[in-house]
Image: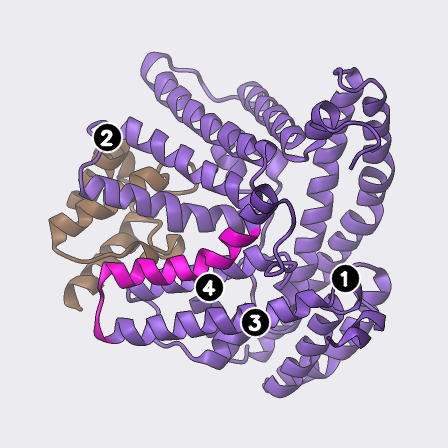
Chain colours: A purple, B brown
Amino acid sequence: MLTWMQDLPNFTAYGTPTYFIYLLVALLPLGIGLYFGKRFSWYEALVSFVFIFLMFDGQSYQQAFSLVAYIIYQTVIVISYFHYRQKQNASAIFYLAVFLSLLPIIIVKFSPAMVGHNSLLGFLGISYLTFRAAGTIIETRDGVVKDLNWWKFVRFMAFMPTITSGPIDRYRRFAKDYQQVPSREKYLDLVAKAVPYLFIGFVYEFVIDYFFGQLWYPFMVKQALLSAPHLSWWVVGVAYTYAGHLYFNFAGYSFFAVAISYLMGVQTPINFNKPFLAKNIKEFWNRWHMTLSFWFRDYIFMRFVFMATKKKWFKNRNVLSSVAYMLNMMVMGFWHGVTWYYILYGFMHGLALVVNDWWLRYKRKHFKIKSTKWTKFVAGFITFNFVVLSFLVFCGFLDKLWFVVPGHH
Amino acid sequence: MQAQIQELLAQATGRDAADFADVTMDLYADGMLDSMATVQFLLSLQDEFDIQVPVSEFDRDAWNTVEKIEARVKELQND
């Protein structure tokens, strides 16, 4: 079926400096339009389609079909639920809509562990699209999504700059930006922000991450595997270089995605805010992969606490918050994938949030430690090192070290 | 109404109402309010003022000071 797509060139989003030349040239007419107060919607749709096509053609071309089918499927669910919700509001229908919306990702995430191979339903970025669709259903139930237009929803789902790896926007916010053209002053302000973001992205992605991701991390992994299955000091090196790689790669990518969105007149929310300066784990999650952690906070944590408090499931609110933290982070762990290391990663962060809250309460009650530069440094140091340890678990290296027989992959 | 809001904030966070005396202070900046306390506070607001505040409605930028909360509550009461 359509094997000619295999032979076409494939461009990973923001993969090479050349990609930016093509992208910026293609976006130039759009930018000129926005400067003169016009949004060329059809041109934008065309450019988006071409660049999304180039992300999914080539060897992985089957994914293109999964993507199209997925977007149609979600659009049907979301629009149907929206129409239903205008007239009625039964909980069962709401849960059914959420379940149907989550069904593809559940199949995709559980397939490798259950049947031993990847599901054909999967494609690069499926989780990010799931968050967008499920979030829209939840806000529709709350009655805050007041108009839902299928074309705008499709544009929201398939917004080119963020389609494969976020940041995760929200329908209401996106639709507001998308249906109005920013004033000239506002647009120039967005461009002025986009330019340094692109530069930071370049430095992170193509310079710093070259060292972490291409040189240091693979070197540490190789050295550490020599003494497999035993731990060695190289494992410490794996942990720190992986943390550097993950941050510079992902934050660099996110800067690109935000910058390109700005150039298209859409203020996609930022994803990273100096996460390694966080002084406790709660603050870390307010700075690291922010659109994901805010999604979990708003749609899982807060809703669970809301329901549990209303229905009085817990007598003690500290117990309630602990349960909510664990639930939140375990779901996040499973979302990454059904492997022991992702689940352990979620568990570690849930536990860290519980311990952190307990410590803050204990400290406030029992002694008055003055916050000084020194205490902040110690707190930041502990937080950073805990995070690095959790990334060591997350990156799956330990699975290779302990459980994969050399020569088998 | 401000005094009531400050009292509810105190209950939700386990602090003193006096900690919320500054009505333009950003409640999220120094971690005065976290997600947990926010939900407790929302629920108590609903009871106290007989309004409906769905969690989706709770945009942190629009609810981050005592002054703004007061304004939003008045709006919702008039809805």
> On the image, numbered disc 2 is attached to which residue?
B16
Amino acid marked by disc 3 = Ala
Of marks 3 and 1, which one's residue comes earlier in the chain?
1
Amino acid marked by disc 2 = Asp
User: CA gap, disc 4 to disc 1?
Assistant: 24 Å
Looking at the picture, does residue A365 appear above or below residue B43?
above
> On the image, numbered disc 3 is attached to which residue?
A69
> On the image, numbered disc 4 is attached to which residue?
A133
Q: Residue at x 18, y 69 (%)?
A: B79
Residues at marks 4 and 3 touching, judged by CB atoms closer than 8 Å:
no
- Which of the two discs, 2 and 4, sits closer to the camera? 4
Give x and y (percent) for residue A9. 84, 70
- Which one is in front, A256 or B68? A256
Q: Is residue A221 left or right of residue A393?
A: right
Picture quadrant where residue A199 is located: bottom right
Give x and y (percent) for residue B49. 13, 53
- Which one is in front, A365 or A401? A401
